[in-house]
Amino acid sequence: LVDFTETSKKAVQQAIAAAKVKNHPIVLLHISSSGESAHGSLLDSLKEYENLIREAGLVVESEVRKGALNAEVASFVKESTPSLVVIGTHGKKGVVQQLLGSKILKLVMGIMAPVLVVSDFSDVVEGGYKKVLLPVAPHLNFLNKVKTTKDLLAKDGKILLFTVLKPGVDLSDSLLANIEAAENFLTENDINWERIRVG
């Protein structure tokens, strides 16, 4: 997702690093608000990002849609079924972060694909991530997120399966099933992993 900020440039750079691992193509998506310029000039504005991607030896295409951000992104993801969605977010502090944080959370929750959120203060990671903290969730698609995380991991990387334990509250059957499925998948695929429990 591109909104022409420095943060979205960093998100594109991280998408390039992730796509290079398996030579995947990248689709740039910009959602236009009603006050923005014409469709053609927005496509022209995406050329800078396209050039970065082509210089990395990857295939790229661009799409501009007009409408409400969350609905348009969810619709595009449903149609195109990407293996990963990369989104940039601003690392602001205080009340502004709470507002921006809730907006990015709503956006991510509406996307039916694995999502990597890149903040403007994070470094671009080349060659895969060394350590990934993966909160275990009870939803049906959790194992798909584990598989995508495996693909983003460095060869010597490690996945930390993170669970919050609440005093007096048992873990749900679906959460326990996802923990077991994740542990089995990671073990069978010789992925270095560790279970982290806090509470």
Image (tube, rainbow, N blue to C red):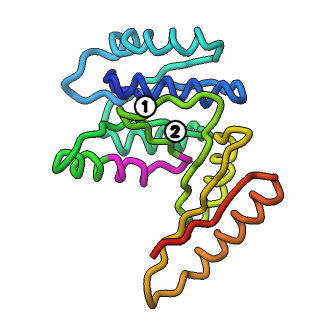
State the residue in front, 34 or 116. Answer: 116
On the picture, is 3 further left or further right than 21? Answer: left
Relative to 89, say whether 41 is above or below: above
Asked if disc 2 and disc 1 are in contact, CB closer than 8 Å, the reply is: yes
- Residue at left 66%, top 24%? 20
Q: Is residue 110 magenta?
A: yes
**SS at circle 1:** loop
Please, which residue is most extreme toward the left here? 95
Quarter the N terminus occupies: top left
Mark number displayed over residue 1:
1
- Residue at left 65%, top 54%? 146
Relative to 41, say whether 123 is above or below: below
- Residue at left 55%, top 15%? 53
- Residue at left 70%, top 71%? 180
Relative to 199, say whether 93 is above or below: above
Mark number displayed over residue 85:
2
Q: Position of residue 116 (x, y in %)?
A: 50, 42
- Magenta residues? 104-114
- Of marks 2 and 1, which one's residue comes earlier in the chain? 1
